[in-house]
Image: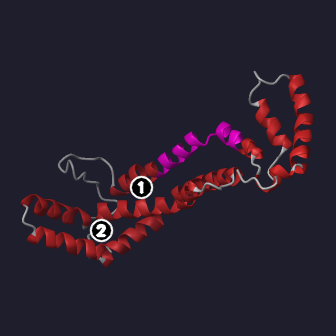
Amino acid sequence: MFPTVVQVLKVVEKDDKDWRNRDQASNLLVYFQSFDFVFYLHLMLTTLAATNTLSLSLQRKDQDIVNAIGCVRSTRHHLISLRRDEWGKLLDEVNEFCAMHDIGTLQMEDTYIDPQQPRKKSGITNKHHYEVDCFNEVIDWLVQELDSRFNETTSELLVCSAAFNPRDSFADFDVDNLMRLAKLYPDDFSFDDLRELRHQLCLYIANVREDGRFSNLNT
């Protein structure tokens, strides 16, 4: 696909009647054939691949909440593993792509030159910029987003709430999880309420499983 995109841009740069389109195509050609672009392209592909299963899982209407939370945790661990172990692999893939398409590569120990401020000394190496400021920072942001949206309290609440799922004759019903859920609301359940609640929940699940009206519920 990449050669096709480059070829289309070359056609636009040469033949388009609007000078603004020609100018834009020319600028894109320069950037698309740079190490910087190739690096960000592969970083994007890597992070999308790492989070794709979770993304698809959360979009499923029939997704089991407990399994979804498990997927969140495994994705988080995978991202941390990527950060720790996969920098070298990503850099190799970037360099291989550049060699395949005649794009110049960078020496990682050379001083980084900011394309926006080429005359200003950055004081850092290419390796520091691409590994620390780009690769690590993007993965850290993704992990922080997962931690923010699925923190311990939220995950606990979702897992406990899954016990209400009526699918397969309330197969996910779990008295202990529902008791944990009730304890998250101390203003609503006193000590005596909690003691009585366990018996009420056991009676409830026995009743609904015997009632044919609940046998075919899915949601």
Q: Which residue is mark 2?
A: 105
**What segment carries the magenta color?**
139-158
Residue 87 seen in render: no
Please state if 144 lies on the left or on the right of 41 as rendered: right
Please state if 20 lies on the left or on the right of 116 as rendered: left
Q: Quadrant of the N terminus?
A: bottom left
Residue 207 placement: quadrant: top right
Residue 195 vertical position relative to residue 99 in the rendered view, above or below? above
SS category of the residue bearing label 2: loop
Please state if 1 lies on the left or on the right of 174 as rendered: left
Q: Which residue is mark 1?
A: 131
Residue at (86% x, 52% y) in the render: 212
Secondary structure, magenta segment, majority class: helix
The tally of labels here is 2
Residue 110 placement: quadrant: bottom left
Residue at (42% x, 70% y) in the render: 92
> Distance between the Cα atoms at labels 2 and 1?
15 Å
Residue at (42% x, 51% y) in the render: 132
Q: Amino acid at mark 2?
A: Thr
Residue 143 seen in render: yes
Indicate the position of residue 94 as horizontal and vertical percent values.
38, 68
Q: Residues within 10 Å of mark 1 (few under 14, many from 20)?
A: some
Residue 195 placement: quadrant: top right
Indicate the position of residue 11 as horizontal and vertical percent values.
15, 73
Q: Amino acid at mark 1?
A: Glu
Q: Residues within 10 Å of mark 2 (few under 14, many from 20)?
A: some
Residue 185 vertical position relative to residue 38 in the rendered view, above or below? above
Tell which of 126 and 148 is nearer to you.
148
Indicate the position of residue 170 as horizontal and vertical percent values.
81, 50
Tell which of 126 and 96 is nearer to you.
96
Residue at (79% x, 30% y) in the render: 183
Tell which of 75 and 86 is nearer to you.
75
